Image (tube, helix red, strand yellow):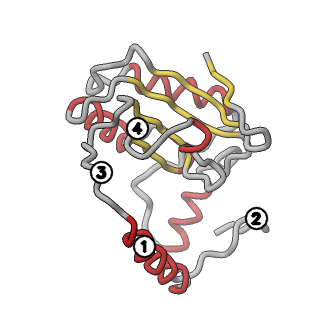
Amino acid sequence: MTVTPDRPTPTAAAEPAIIDRFLEANRAYAVTFRDGGMDARPVQKVTVVACMDARLDLFAALGLELGDAHLIRNAGGVVTDDTIRSLTISQRALGTRSIALIHHTGCGLLGLTEDFRRELELEVGQRPTWSVESFVDLDGDVRQSMQRVRTSPFIPYRDDVRGFVFDVHTGLLREIH
């Protein structure tokens, strides 16, 4: 598999210490946690589809509070079949009506190619069933994502689907039309 300096060589498993720290933090969190009686239905009736990039703090960037929105994250914020599945459930079963699609500058999928998939197949001996969904045109990929949502027969509310690019250097969203 091609490895670049900003992409470390994969290891067999994440270091257990970080997961242990999660458990410790969770115990501290649970001490003051109070069930506020929130419903699973988002208060703002919105779903945000965004990249999994660790630099995107969607709650802070969008002014969201716990319970306000559904957040669907994956590599690139790509609208895949599984994203459509989650959006469909979000709207049909849990009452959301608006969809915000957020890509970002400096995304790891920018310029990645399907060679990644082929190299992975050679390494592990099995072809991935999924597509990399890489792109070279950030704005164009946002438009493609909006089109995938707007043409899905499973998503009933498609009037308020908007796409954005988040600038990782300024924190600002730029709307894509």
Q: Secondary structure at mark 4?
A: loop
To which residue does mark 1 refer?
26
- C-alpha separation, residue under disc 1 versus residue under disc 4: 22 Å
The type of residue carrying mark 3 is Gly
112 w.r.t. 174: above or below: below
Q: Which mark's residue is nearer the viewer, 3 or 2? A: 3
Identify the residue at image location x=44%, y=61%. 127
Q: Secondary structure at mark 3?
A: loop
Which quadrant of the view contains residue 29? bottom left
> Of circles 1 and 3, which is in front?
3
| Residue type at the position of mark 4 | Asp
Question: Of the residues under marks 1 and 3, which one precedes in the sequence?
Answer: 1
- What residue did someone put label 3 on? 36
> Residue 159: horizontal and vertical position, in percent?
39, 13
Q: Which residue is mark 4?
A: 68
Residue 70 vs residue 116, the one in the foreground: 70
Depth-wise, is mark 4 or mark 3 nearer the camera? Answer: 3
Q: Amino acid at mark 2?
A: Asp
**Residues at marks 4 and 3 touching, judged by CB atoms closer than 8 Å:** no
Tag 3 near tag 2, CB within 8 Å: no
Q: Quadrant of the N terminus?
A: bottom right
Name the residue rendered at 60%, 48% in the picture: 57
Q: Earlier in the sequence, mark 4 or mark 3?
A: 3
Count numbered badges in the picture: 4
Q: Picture quarter containing residue 163?
A: top right
Q: Is residue 82 left or right of residue 174?
A: left
**Residue under label 2:** 6
Q: Nearer the viewer, mark 4 or mark 2?
A: 4
Q: Secondary structure at mark 1?
A: helix
